[in-house]
Image (spheres, rainbow, N blue to C red):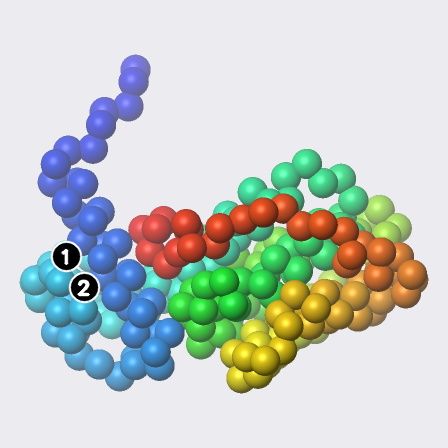
């Protein structure tokens, strides 16, 4: 049987939840997490009572906001690496695109960086995809990795450090800096310097990160 279309009430509830998530992401990006529930609902332009129809605590909302941002990022990476067969190129392309995110969508970037430690352990966003690509590269003989978990921690640390650097040093060329870090990571994972450089010189697909900004999956 065909699925029943969402009712007007369900659509309104979905819009309210999305508004709360977007407001929380904006507050996280600005470093304003020590605010009241009332301030959050005012930023979302929803009633105070609506908050508790969706979340029990601020912490629960913030967790949902971070997971939403990670999911947006992860969905973009999936879309932009479709059709690539070489796990080394999939890894490199995902990291190169992630590095460019920091300048193209600074709000989404700051949400991710604010909860940076979750990047290496989360079931959402970059971490599970990076682990998948590292392990696929090892199975295919493209990477030389003794411990995929440690490799993932190293990659996550590089991603976070790169993001913070690009925000603090706006004069730096984000594409050139990101590609250099990606090249270094590929060498760490076992590729030759020549191949790592060649992969990081390949053209990237066009993308508009602003079309999938924070809150769009809520």
Residue at 50% x, 62% y is 104
Q: Quick one: label 1 or label 2, which is nearer the N terminus?
A: 2
- Image height check: is 105 above or below 142? below
Compared across the picture, whether 101 is left or right of 16 comes to right
Label 1's element? loop
- Callout 2: few (<14), some (14-19), or many (20+) C-alpha neighbours within 10 Å? many
Q: Which of 12 and 3 is in front in this view?
A: 12
Q: What label sits on residue 216 in the rendered view? A: none
Can you tell which of label 1 and label 2 is closer to the viewer?
Answer: 2
Pick out the residue farthest to the front.
171
Residue at 78% x, 56% y is 201
Residue annotated with mark 1: 53
Label 2's element? helix
Residue 121 at least partly seen: no
Residue 213 on image: x %, y %: 39, 56
Q: What label sits on residue 44 in the rendered view? A: 2
Residue 157 on image: x %, y %: 64, 75
Compared across the picture, whether 86 is left or right of 169 comes to right
Residue 122 on image: x %, y %: 52, 63
Residue 70 at least partly seen: yes
Compared across the picture, whether 214 is left or right of 179 comes to left
- Callout 1: few (<14), some (14-19), or many (20+) C-alpha neighbours within 10 Å? few
Residue at 52% x, 68% y is 102
Residue 65 sits in quarter: bottom left
Q: Nearer the viewer, residue 168 or 74?
A: 168
Compared across the picture, whether 28 is left or right of 192 comes to left
């Amino acid at each position: 049987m065909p699925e029943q279309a969402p009712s007007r009430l369900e659509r309104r509830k979905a819009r309210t939840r999305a508004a709360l998530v977007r407001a929380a992401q904006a507050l996280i990006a600005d470093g304003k997490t020590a605010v009241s529930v009332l301030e959050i609902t005012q930023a979302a332009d929803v009633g105070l009572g609506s908050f508790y129809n969706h979340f029990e605590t601020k912490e629960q909302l913030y967790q949902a906001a971070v997971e939403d941002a990670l999911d947006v990022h992860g969905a973009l990476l999936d879309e932009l690496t479709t059709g690539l067969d070489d796990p080394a190129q999939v890894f490199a392309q995902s990291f190169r695109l992630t590095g460019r995110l920091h300048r193209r969508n600074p709000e989404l970037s700051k949400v991710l960086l604010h909860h940076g430690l979750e990047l290496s352990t989360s079931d959402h966003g970059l971490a599970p995809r990076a682990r998948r690509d590292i392990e696929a590269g090892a199975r295919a003989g493209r990477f030389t990795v003794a411990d995929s978990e440690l490799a993932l921690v190293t990659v996550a640390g590089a991603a976070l450090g790169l993001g913070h650097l690009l925000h603090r040093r706006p004069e730096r060329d984000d594409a050139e800096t990101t590609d250099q870090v990606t090249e270094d990571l590929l060498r760490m994972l076992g590729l030759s310097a020549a191949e790592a450089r060649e992969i990081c010189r390949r053209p990237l697909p066009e993308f508009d990160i602003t079309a999938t900004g924070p809150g769009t999956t809520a």
